[in-house]
């Protein structure tokens, strides 16, 4: 979850061939800390950069894992930009529960609003960079497959 980075963690990273998946559910302190109760936004984003630097140094992969929810869905385009600026992969997890934070069970007009907003985003990115291309592709796959399906199946 990105809250722990220490000399011990760094030594393990240097000795074992591992990749990093780090959860980050908001790019704003207030929303992040409301989702990840008792966490610290500055600590996690600082550790994210330390892990990113280690991944670059040792030719490892890093992925930011985000959970699109009612309180952060509007940030999804900025997650693509954030990941691309840091040359890391981005992945969207589907949240089924708890119901009060999930997107899939919203009323159809709300899902339509979310879909329309997300679908109409544009991104400037380096087409030769595999992470940039992949992040934009994964974003639109999430929007076109997941959110669109929820919209089409909602009552």
Image (cartoon, rainbow, N blue to C red):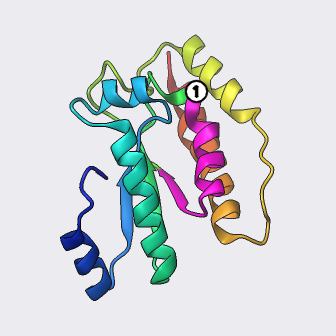
Q: Give the mark count.
A: 1
Residue 98 in the image: state x and y as whole percent: 26, 27
Q: Give the quarter of the image for residue 114.
A: top right
Above or below, 32 against 19 in this view is above
Disc 1 element: helix
Residue 134 in the image: state x and y as whole percent: 64, 62
* Residue drawn 30% across the image and 22% down it: 99
* Residue drawn 64% across the image and 18% down it: 113
Q: Closest to the observer: 39 or 138? A: 39
Residue 119 in the image: state x and y as whole percent: 71, 34
Task: Please tell me whether residue 89 belongs to the stretch shown in magenta.
Answer: yes
Classify residue 114 as left or right of residue 123.
left
Q: Closest to the observer: 117 or 19? A: 19
Label the magenta part by its dominant secondary structure: helix
Q: What residue is pinned by disc 1?
A: 74
Task: Please tell me whether residue 107 belongs to the stretch shown in magenta.
Answer: no
Q: Closest to the observer: 89 or 53? A: 53
Q: Residues within 10 Å of mark 1 (few under 14, many from 20)?
A: some
Above or below, 50 against 11 in this view is above
Q: Give the quarter of the image for residue 115.
A: top right
What range of the chain is rendered magenta?
A: 74-91
* Residue drawn 36% across the image and 47% down it: 44
* Residue drawn 65% across the image and 55% down it: 85
Classify residue 63 as left or right of residue 77.
left
Residue 83 in the image: state x and y as whole percent: 58, 53
Q: Give the quarter of the image for residue 103.
A: top left
Q: From this viewpoint, is residue 154 visible? A: yes
């Amino acid at each position: 979850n990105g809250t722990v980075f220490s000399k011990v963690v760094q030594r393990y990273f240097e000795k074992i061939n591992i990749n990093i998946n780090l959860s980050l559910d908001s790019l704003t302190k207030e929303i992040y800390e409301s989702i990840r109760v008792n966490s610290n936004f500055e600590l996690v984003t600082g550790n994210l950069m330390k892990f990113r630097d280690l991944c670059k140094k040792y030719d490892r992969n890093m992925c930011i894992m985000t959970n699109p929810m009612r309180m952060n869905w509007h940030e999804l385009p900025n997650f693509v930009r954030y990941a691309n600026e840091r040359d890391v992969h981005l992945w969207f997890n589907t949240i089924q529960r708890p119901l009060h934070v999930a997107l899939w069970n919203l009323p159809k007009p709300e899902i339509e609003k979310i879909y329309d907003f997300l679908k109409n985003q544009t991104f400037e990115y380096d087409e030769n960079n595999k992470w940039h291309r992949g992040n934009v592709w994964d974003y639109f796959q999430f929007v076109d497959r997941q959110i669109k399906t929820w919209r089409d199946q909602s009552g």
